Image (cartoon, rainbow, N blue to C red):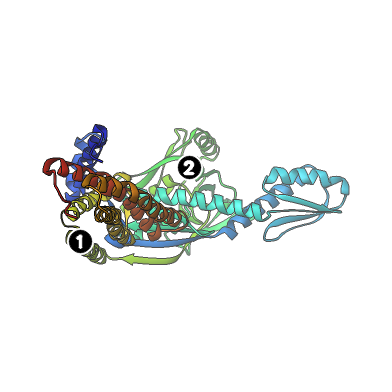
Amino acid sequence: MMFIPLWKRILVVVTVILSFAYTLPNFVSEQTREQWSQSLPSWMPSKSVSLGLDLQGGAHLLLQADIVSVVKKRIDDVEQFTRRNMKSDELSYSKIDTDKVGVRVTLKSEDDVSALRKIFRQADDGLVIDAEGLEVYAYFDEAGLKDITDKTISQSIEVVSRRVNGTGTKEPIIQRQGDDRVLVQLPGMENPERVKDLLNQTAQLSFHLVSSSGEGLNVTSLPMREDPNDRLPINRRPLLTGEMLVTANPTFQDGAPIVSFRLNSVGAKKFCDVTRDNVNRPFAVVLDGEIITAPRINEPICGGSAVITGNFTVQEASDLALLLRAGALPTTLTIVEERTVGPSLGRDSVEAGKIATMVAFLLIIAFMCVSYRLFGVFASIALFVNMFLIIALLSMLQATLTLPGIAGIVLTMGMAVDANVLIFERIREEIRNGRSILSSMDTGYSKAMASIIDSNLTTLIAGIVLYAVGTGPIKGFAVTMSIGIATSLFSAIMLTRLMLVIWMRVKKPKALPV
């Protein structure tokens, strides 16, 4: 008990110093933190705790993906592919139709069944193919539909993240919720309407030639962006799609806002060929079913770069460029839930959390000092350091602190002194049994250790489960509680023990003030 290795002493002291250092950025202004991050080495402390939506205000959006339309498009693509290939392979059929999950073809000859199976496999490798007589049915089973849903949500989250991050929002929370929904939380967002407008667009960009005839199966009529009543006939088949874009940026031309874009090598070559073959013909730039602009091709465009004009405002040009850079959503996202938390309400929550933490801290200190006198003072000092350890770790991990997270911190404050209570009560019991001071303290620490580890381990398991299966605020509570358990073990066992050893060596007491 009286001997603590030098490396353990150094570890305790260094940990305490680092906890104060990494907590310090939370007590300075954001401007000062930015200056530190630019001037100090990357390993130096310059980060603060990230506050959640409920503590600094912002927007909460729950988006639902239209999975049905994604499946329908996949099925329509399979049908069109099948029709083309059956025609080229000269397969005879009497009927072809679709349902919600697949394509059904009735052939005229059983000799064509194997050839049709091959066509279906080429059309989409996720199809399950069943054949009964002359009827061949290719469909998506439950596993196939789940795969489509998972990929759609994953791609949606990726695109939403790029769009939200492009607006300059700090620490957004974007995650899947349920089977077909995406949760978007934007702490500190002052203009949620702009983000909603960005998320309401799928940003499917394509370039089409304007139809000279104005009619036919391969022609469709789309509205102009500036005047929906003005419609223009265009060829259904696009010349280029937004997938070939490398980048897009807002800029100015003759004092008017425009969007400049650059194509990849494949798109640049294709754009060059198309514009060379269609000089003096108009072509339409289509975004989400609306024609943004329909300029005339005056000369071949072969540099891989071009501009989109359309009487934009500066904000519209900036948002369009952001949408094009972020890429297209695989389907539409509908806002099914929306909440806005004002910054004043967030500040009130922070202040209430501070008050609750301080009251809990003072009451625990008073109880410990009254119950265990000088030992209680040591435990209170360790509790104070434990608070800094928690904040330092939250800052280093850039974990998001929410109101339930503050509740987790308050809870761990009581748990932080629980280990000391077990140790001190055991020491009291050993003294009453007639043991010496050193023997009582040795036995107190050794005998109480099993109970301390058991109690904290069971609570940590609960925290891990909450983090694994919980969402949002529940995760925040689990994170702070789990961090608090780890830091309380350090402060209650190592730090308090070091203070007791130093006090005993200096004072050499004849009786323990416990």
Residue at the extreme left of the image, as rendered? 507
Query: Is residue 401 visible to us here?
Result: yes
Disc 1, SS: helix
Q: Is residue 401 left or right of residue 232?
A: left
Residue 297, numbered circle? 2
Pinpoint residue 447: horizontal percent, then vertical percent: 34, 49
Q: Residue at x 68, y 54 (%)?
A: 140
Q: Which residue is mark 1?
A: 371
First in sequence: mark 1 vs mark 2: 2
* Amino acid type for the residue under numbered disc 1: Ser
Q: Residue at x 38, y 48 (%)?
A: 322
Of residues 454 and 357, the one nearer the viewer is 454
Of residues 98 and 371, the one nearer the viewer is 371
State yes or no: discs 1 and 2 in contact (Cβ < 8 Å).
no
- Nearer to us: label 1 or label 2: 1
Residue at the extreme front of the image, as rendered? 434
Q: Quadrant of residue 365?
A: bottom left
Q: Residue at x 49, y 45 (%)?
A: 242
Q: From the image, which quarter does the C terminus lie in?
A: bottom left
Using a 10 Å C-alpha cutoff, classify the residue at mark 2 as few (fewer than 14 neighbours), some (14 to 19) or many (20 or more): some
Pinpoint residue 125: horizontal percent, then vertical percent: 68, 45
Q: Is residue 35 above or below residue 480?
A: above
Picture mark count: 2
Using a 10 Å C-alpha cutoff, classify the residue at mark 1 as few (fewer than 14 neighbours), some (14 to 19) or many (20 or more): some
* Amino acid type for the residue under numbered disc 2: Ile
Q: Is residue 327 above or below residue 425?
A: above
Q: CA distance from mark 1 to mark 2?
A: 88 Å
Q: Residue at x 31, y 48 (%)?
A: 489
Pinpoint residue 483: horizontal percent, then vertical percent: 33, 50
Of residues 76 and 276, the one nearer the viewer is 76
Of residues 75 and 388, the one nearer the viewer is 388
Pinpoint residue 116: horizontal percent, then vertical percent: 78, 46
